[in-house]
Image (cartoon, rainbow, N blue to C red):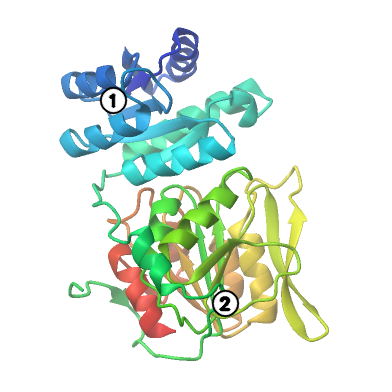
Amino acid sequence: MAVRVLVVDDSGFFRRRVTEMLESDQAIEVIGIAENGNDAIAKVKELRPDVVTMDIEMPELDGISATRSIMQSNPTRIIMFSSLTTDGAKSTLDALDAGALDFLPKRFEDISNDREEARKLLCDRVKQLARQALNVRAPAQVTKTNATAVKSSPLKTSNAPSTATTSAPIKRGGINLLAIGTSTGGPVALQDVLTKLPANFPVPILLVQHMPGSFTPAFAQRLNDLCKVTVKEAADGDVLEPAFAYLAPGGKQMTLEKINGEVKIKIQEAKPSQTYKPCVDITFSSIAKFYPNNTLAVILTGMGADGREGSRALKSVGSKIWAQDEDSCVVYGMPAAVAEAGLTERVLALNEMGASIAQRV
């Protein structure tokens, strides 16, 4: 059965372009179009699409407000089209908070200079999301005011019953680094996890989220505003400090190096041949060299298998691997890859992950 899609955009040219790209795939059917947010809300109620592609800036009602309304009345899988600008990044993050599951650049040239590659990526994203169970999530409970109040200075020193599966008893201590890798659904998942960590979290945190370079500064700032730990976009030469989370810059690769006995972050330009920029496998494999048996690595929601080989490298030297469970994932791809490879020590629901990490570390 074909995936039924509603295309929402105020530009007739863009609606036609997206429709043509989607309908080039026999597994996808565009069942309707909408010209603004109010039209989108009505069409979702009438047509019940499997997936909605949504523009952010539209007359009458913008895409963020429309997404919020749709998720409250008729929850649907929504992909946002966004400009790769600072303002576009902030708006896209707002849309993800409102309930959108994924985003793509509105300029297809920003996806790939190869039109066929861009078309395939769009169709693959739509089909992948349509296959996933729709998990309707509540808005984040942490406010900027609460989180900021905890941060008295930029430098910090170091509820439901669990249904987690585990192959070993929980132990505390013995962890010197937390590393988290994620992709589709990751911005909201990371927010959920990191806001549950205390201000005195005793180890550094490395974060790898598949995201464009223009988005990671805004995302790091948003997390920093919400969390008790300090979150920053990682910079070349950063020294790892407890209670600091370092977000890999989009479009680049983050590894570690030791200089004069001190472990520091190394940021390098990604190679054209590398699929993921940043790449979880690259960061995790580097961590294995410097924190061989005292890292807790966590794989959250995301498409594909990035993180599996890096997790394999970490596990081979004695580190611990946790993964998000299928029911709470937007896309159960990356966590499934590590679980099916037999690498996970624990599999946890997203709403249990943050508290469990804090307890373990």
User: What is the crowding at mark 1: few (fewer than 14 residues within 10 Å), some, or many (at least 20)?
Assistant: few
Numbered label attached to residue 226: none
The kind of residue tagged 2 is Leu
Q: Residue at the spot x=41%, y=77% of the render?
A: 345
Can residue 194 be seen here? The reply is: no
- Decide if residue 18 is in sight here: yes
Residue sitting nearer the eye, 177 or 288? 177
Instruction: Give how far across and how far down residue 251 sits, in percent.
Output: 67, 47
Q: Is residue 80 above or below residue 296?
A: above
Q: Residue furthest right?
A: 260
Front-most of residues 328 and 39 = 39
- Residue for badge 1: 1
Which mark, by number, is residue 155?
A: 2
Q: Of callouts 1 and 2, which one flags the residue occurring earlier in the amino acid sequence? A: 1
- For the point 39% across and 66% down, the residue is 147
* Whole-number angstrom distance, CA of label 1 to CA of label 2: 54 Å
**1 or 2: mark nearer the eye:** 2
| Position of 267 relative to 289 (above/below) | above
Which residue sits at x=39%, y=26%?
53
Q: Position of residue 261 (x, y in %)?
A: 79, 86
